[in-house]
Amino acid sequence: LLAIARNGAQAVCFAPDKPQRDVINHLTGEPLTEQRNVLVEAARIARGDILPLTQARAETLDALIVPGGFGAAKNLSSFAAEGSECQVDRDLQALALAMHQAGKPLGFMCIAPALLPKIFAFPLRITIGTDLDTADVVEEMGAEHVPCPVDDIVVDEENKVVT
């Protein structure tokens, strides 16, 4: 968010308004029995300036950036549990498809690029970094994986996708 602001752009944050797939005690790594809402938890990171993903409209956005981490693998999709058989949040999928159809760029970071083969019905050139096991999974799903160090990017210029 800081890099976006430093470059003169305005970030608009969105998250699904639904229960988290699971809740973890990050001190112990143990699962908790309580329920938490994805939107409410994401508001901590966005400092309260966030909207439900259902309100995102491609026509009002210049680009779509999807951060990675367990949130993408567990709450924006079921990738963490189901791998190549995962499902992607339907609102994220609809937004990504609308952005692509409008010719707007997409940026997916960390594990989030693993969702792209499920969003799009055509092969994309992507990276999830240097994790060869995950690379095998995204290739099984139909993507072309390009190994890439953590401080670099892969650009699918034809589809305006940066990973």
Image: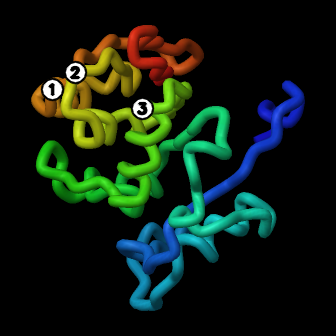
Marks 1/2 in contact by CB < 8 Å: the verdict is yes
Q: CA distance from mark 1 to mark 2?
A: 6 Å
Q: Residue at x 51, y 66 (%)?
A: 54
Q: CA distance from mark 3 to mark 1?
A: 20 Å
The residue shown at (56%, 44%) is: 58
Q: Nearer the viewer, residue 112 or 49?
A: 49
Q: Which residue is mark 1?
A: 142
Q: Secondary structure at mark 2?
A: loop
Q: Identify which amino acid the numbered label 2 is placed on.
A: Pro
Task: Where is residue 138? Give x, y as percent.
Answer: 21, 30
| Secondary-structure class at tag 1 | loop
Give percent across and percent down for residue 102. 50, 31
Disc 3 or disc 2, which is closer to the eye? 3
Check contact, mark 3 vs mark 1: CB within 8 A.
no
**Label number found at residue 123:** 2
In the picture, the disc for residue 101 is 3
Q: In the picture, residue 19 is in which quadrant? A: bottom left
The residue lying at 23 percent from left, 55 percent from top is 87
